[in-house]
Image (tube, coloured by chain):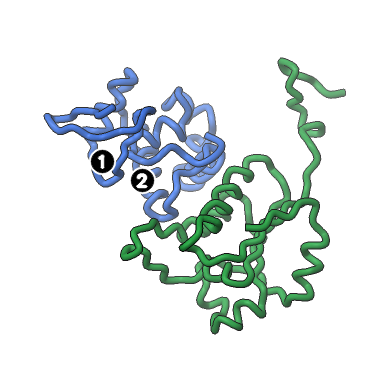
Chain colours: A blue, B green
Amino acid sequence: MPIVVNGQSYETDEEGYLTNRNDWNEDLAKEMAKVDNCSLSDNHWEVINFLREYYDEYQIAPAVRVLTKAIGKKLGPDKGNSKYLYELFPYGPAKQACKYAGLPKPTGCV
Amino acid sequence: MSETTGGVEMDEDVSGVVKKFLYVNRKAPYGTIYALESLEVVLIAAAFDQDVSLVFLDDGVYQLAKGQHTKTIDVKNFSPTYRALEGYDIEKLYVEKESLEARGLTTEDLIVPVTLLPAAEMAELMDGQDVVLSF
């Protein structure tokens, strides 16, 4: 099921995750969020950018527990907790934020 | 007394016995799927809060070697993922001393900190496990 942004079509898998990570751009993330009725705030972008950096470094999308802990380490305890992250990404922070970040679905416990 | 929620035991004390799991990696990182599959199983199993150790021996020590360039064989270089294990609370990584030395490598050549164990002690480590999974 391809997603079309600015006249350009991008391939995604059946769950909406981007097939080719290098296709990613910010407009694409915004369009994916719009499909979920979500408008991306600075707080969303903070998590999305964090995930992209994490993937660049470790070549995986982190499990939600690992994401929560790592966010806490980087952005402080008021952001490194499930409540904060689930409010931003109600479909599950790892699952939903990874999708907008153009990453594959996280391995294991999401 | 333990509380139940919807029939699922949520109390810490009854959430299950912690077993000692050992993942034994003995194949080179590419050419077969074993190394990557093992790593994925470890990452998934990390969610279950068990006592996990990883062992690298024989050609398995190459899985941790620095400077893996996989572009020309057209597969993903997944070696950076071993550095993520710490964040998954998997910190017990053992490398067999003889295997490493036989391949002309030292711990300096590895991408993560490990504990070197001579073969005899490796046998003891394996003996002390509840579950040993070999890849």
Q: Residue at x 43, y 37 (%)?
A: A105
Residue in front for this viewpoint, A5 or A27: A5
Residue in front for this viewpoint, A83 or B81: B81
Q: Residue at x 41, y 30 (%)?
A: A96
Q: Quadrant of residue B2?
A: top right
- Under circle 1, the secondary element is loop
Q: Chain of mark 1?
A: A
- Label 2 crowd (10 A; few <14 / some 14-19 / many >=20): many
Alpha carbons under labels 2 and 1: distance apart:
10 Å
Q: Are marks 2 and 1 in contact (CB under 8 Å)?
A: yes
Q: Chain of mark 2?
A: A
- Under circle 2, the secondary element is helix
Residue A44 position (above or below residue B123): above
Mark linked to residue A81: none
Mark linked to residue A52: 2
- Label 1 crowd (10 A; few <14 / some 14-19 / many >=20): some
| x then y, percent, for residue B113 | 58, 68
User: Looking at the picture, which amino acid does disc 1 mark?
Assistant: Trp
Residue A70 position (above or below residue A82): below
In the displayed image of the protein, which residue is found farthest to the top? B6
Q: Residue at x 57, y 76 (%)?
A: B107
In the displayed image of the protein, which residue is found farthest to the left? A7
Left or right: where A103 falls relative to B32: left
User: Looking at the picture, which amino acid does disc 2 mark?
Assistant: Arg
Mark linked to residue A24: 1
